Amino acid sequence: MPDQIDSWLDAAMADYANVHAPLGFEARVITRLRERKKSRTWMWPAVVAAGIAIAVFTVIADRTNTVDLPSYTVRIAVPPIQRTSATVAAPRTNHQVLRAVETRGVPIVSAPVTAQEEAILRVTRNARAKQLASFATDRTDLTQEKNLLEIQELDFPPVAKREDKQ
Amino acid sequence: MRDGGNVIAVRLWTKASDETALESCVREHGQIVYRIAFSVLRNEHDAEDAAQETFLRALRSGRLNDVNDSRAWLAKIAWRIALDHRRPHDVGIDAIAEPASTVLDAENQMLRDERTQLLHELIRSLPRELQDVVTLSTVQELNGADVAEILGIPESSVRTRMHRARALMKEKLEAKLRKGAQDARPNR
């Protein structure tokens, strides 16, 4: 009985394994693969052409549909040039001459500058004028401080002389 | 697994789409790919579709240049694709279709069909790990080492599993024969 079963199994396995591909199997597979390859080779140029067409369409549509943006005029309030008056002491002369100095802003360059640039220039100019004015109001003369170490001769101040003459 | 066969042909196929190389590759490995697919699916049309998909996937992968043993590689792909195509419930006795065979008389053919169907039932009743080994062992071109490589198990495991599978099938067959004999006695 076991031998019969063994032989039955062997025969059945042999039959089970006796498989052959149907006639024309290879030819069919090759044909299908070629068809697939052809479709794939045609596919890529089509995809590229479609991409280019979409890009061109997008550019054209973008150009035709450009909307004229409204123009805005903005007026910027620019501070005017400040004029500062101050008295300046002449340091190199013994006579303290009080002079009225009027600082003016640097002449505006005719170069095309924007409103913002012009505003910045004006602000800096005013700052410079204020700086000069502060120098003028400070009457300390360093030359006189240097003379403190020396024995000074009595001398009438020139202002008094002028008053006498007058 | 032995040398990969027409490796140069496969390389030419992928590189320069050489039609001759393509044909030689399919003709050289077509049979084993088909048999592996048929061993799982047991249906001509499904096996042919699976074989075609195997070659197509190999072509698409672009790895054919790196493959030394193209036969083993294609066999693995065919095995996986066939398993993917296998539907768990439709491979019953009715779905089994024997491929075209030589001219036989009707009685012999009927006996063979019956035997094949019975064996198929026995194989399908085995645990999955044993089932895979038996299925691949029915492919004529594959030896124990090939089966081991496709399944990713040691060759010794293939032998052990094959032995166990055969023992189980014998056991079930004996039980079936005994049951058949018992059913036949009361009628007499």
Image (cartoon, coloured by chain):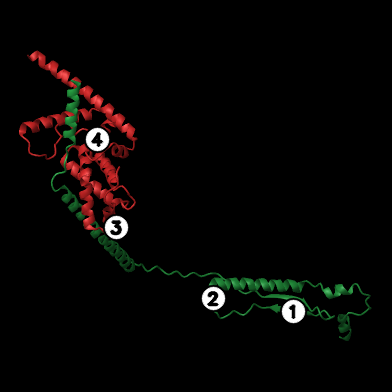
Chain colours: A green, B red
- Give the class, few, some or many, for how many residues have Cα within 10 Å of label 3's Cα (few <14, many ≥20): few
- Give the class, few, some or many, for how many residues have Cα within 10 Å of label 2's Cα (few <14, many ≥20): few
Q: How far apart are marks 4 and 2 (CA)?
A: 91 Å
Which of discs 3 and 2 lies nearer the camera? The answer is 3
Q: Are marks 3 and 4 on the same chain?
A: yes
Residue at mark 1: A100
Residue at mark 4: B137
Along the viewing direction, whichever of B165 and B2 lies nearer the viewer? B2
Are the residues at dot 3 and dot 1 in contact (C-beta closer than 8 Å)? no
Residue at mark 2: A113
Q: Which chain carries label 2?
A: A
- The spot of residue A165 in percent (x, y) is 88, 86
Q: Distance between the residues labelled 3 and 4?
A: 34 Å
Are the residues at dot 3 and dot 2 in contact (C-beta closer than 8 Å)? no
**Residue A160 in the image: above or below residue B71:** below
Which three-letter amino acid code belongs to the residue tagged 1?
A: Ala
Q: Is mark 1 on a helix, strand or loop?
A: strand
Q: What element carries label 2?
A: loop
- The spot of residue B127 in percent (x, y) is 27, 28
Which of the marked residues, 1 or 2, is nearer the chain's N terminus? 1
A88 horizontally vs B151: left or right: right
Could you tell me which residue is drawn at 32 percent across and 49 percent down? B68
Residue at mark 3: B15
Q: How far apart are marks 4 and 1 (CA)?
A: 118 Å
Which of discs 4 and 2 lies nearer the camera? The answer is 4
Q: Distance between the residues labelled 1 and 2?
A: 33 Å
Q: Do labels 3 and 1 share a chain?
A: no
Could you tell me which residue is drawn at 33 percent across and 68 percent down? A63
Which of discs 4 and 1 lies nearer the camera? The answer is 4
Q: Mark 3 lies on which chain?
A: B
Could you tell me which residue is drawn at 16 percent across and 47 percent down? A25
Q: Which chain carries label 1?
A: A
